[in-house]
Amino acid sequence: MAEITFEGVSKVYDDGTEAVLDFDLQIPHGTFMVLVGPSGCGKTTALRMVAGLEEITAGTIRLGDRVINDVQPKNRDLAMVFQNYALYPHMSVYDNIAFGLRLRKIPGREVRTQVEKAAATLGLSDLLKKKPRHLSGGQRQRVAMGRAIVRDPKAFLMDEPLSNLDAKLRVQMRAEIARIQRDLGVTTIYVTHDQTEAMTMGDQVAVMRDGLLQQVGTPQDVYAHPRNLFSAGFIGSPAMNLIEARLVQRAGELTVEFADTRLRLDDRPGNHSQLASFVGRSIVLGIRPEDMEDAALIGEAPADRRIGARVDLCEVVGPEVYLHFTVDAPPALTDDTRALAAETGDEAVEALEHQAGGKHSAFVARVNRRTAAREGANVELLIDTAALHFFDPQTGNALS
Ligand code: ATP
């Protein structure tokens, strides 16, 4: 069984950079685990420590029952797939896939069987005689996968393997890699900065920031229950709207309020005990774009379930419309939200600081394409108040 376990693993580079800190993660046998996070968060370093390409400063990595900290890379029985496929240009597809097997002195007939089996799995059977330069990017990526598959490794380690492909091919290869992994049932660690890739491919995702693990869970779980502001803002596209608001208790009713808006929370499932201690105080309110709908499409929409907005921009995206508007409340400004803005670029950080100064926040709602909302016009948005998210503005941790 090839379970991979990190126990208190840290990596400090010689120049003092703390790339990974006290990392605990258990990857059960056969799991497709995606390490996701912004550039520089330590995901490649974590993967390279499993591969044995980077020394471990502290902690333990196990493969099954065996501690592999000091095992030579070649003896770990793992296969890596990188973004630059590292194919041998002068060799045919067949020879590229067969290379590792021949190196291990596997008999010719066995090599043929394995290469043909892998080629069939990968849809490469008709291309075995071609040289890499005659292949498309997606086909080259498949050859690289083929080389990994025939080694019959204990685990696959993949570092942004799709980042060199164009958008359409990337979507196709995402599905293909996920299918192949499922068919083979080989434990896989997949590194990406692309949250969509993480959400669509992983059985489990591990969100990282600044060398620290933020949250681990199924994509659905991390999406529905982000543990902190960073996970909340990083996972999901368009991102969760995050603003400063106040929790108020009025005549036995709990409400969340900002500007002229007052949303009643009585239909929130579960208990409010964690929220109770924030009554009368600022909190960070999170609303996913899809938890808003054009109220005109619904019919009845009580006033305490609505946000009134003036539409700044109407973006038709396939079957949906993204309504961009401004809310008269400051955006949540914390280390996490600054870090998230920094991912988009310096301009996004400036915009965030500017909005906070001016007490306005950019919002996006994902509404049905039947909406009649138009740019410059007012719209009433019905909020699914049972789906609201709340965070402690000091710690960034999710409440309730
Ligand atoms: P990316 O997606 O940009 O590759 P990442 O999340 O994979 O980012 P790492 O490559 O693991 O991040 O890097 C984590 C941190 O360690 C970064 O601050 C990086 O600059 C630093 N780092 C990586 N390799 C070295 C090295 N050999 N020496 C010193 N610092 C390093």
Image (cartoon, rainbow, N blue to C red):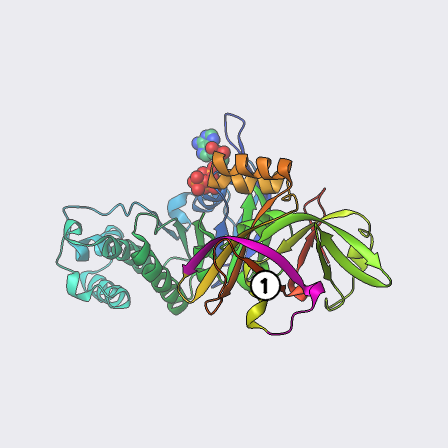
Number of callouts in the render?
1
Disc 1 on helix, strand or loop?
helix
Three-letter code for the amino acid on which mark 1 is drawn: Asp
Task: Decide which of 170, 8 is in the foreground and name it.
Answer: 170
Binning the other alpha carbons within 10 Å of mark 1 as few (below 14), some (14 to 19) or many (20 upward) gives some
Question: In percent of the image, x 18 and y 61: which residue is there?
Answer: 108
What x and y, as percent, mark residue 339? Answer: 56, 39
Say which quarter of the image contains residue 290. bottom right
Task: Decide which of 119, 241 is in the foreground and name it.
Answer: 241
Question: In percent of the image, x 38 and y 69: which residue is there?
Answer: 183
| Beta carbon of the mark 1 residue lies under 8 A of ligand 1 | no
What x and y, as percent, mark residue 378? Answer: 56, 57
Residue 348 appears in the figure: yes
Question: In percent of the image, x 59 and y 63: which residue is there?
Answer: 291
The stretch drawn in magenta includes residue 315:
yes
Left or right: residue 170 compared with residue 33 = left
Task: Decide which of 104, 355 is in the foreground and name it.
Answer: 355
Say which quarter of the image contains residue 179. bottom left
Read off the residue under disc 1.
291
| Region in magenta | 299-316
Quarter of the image that includes the C terminus: bottom right
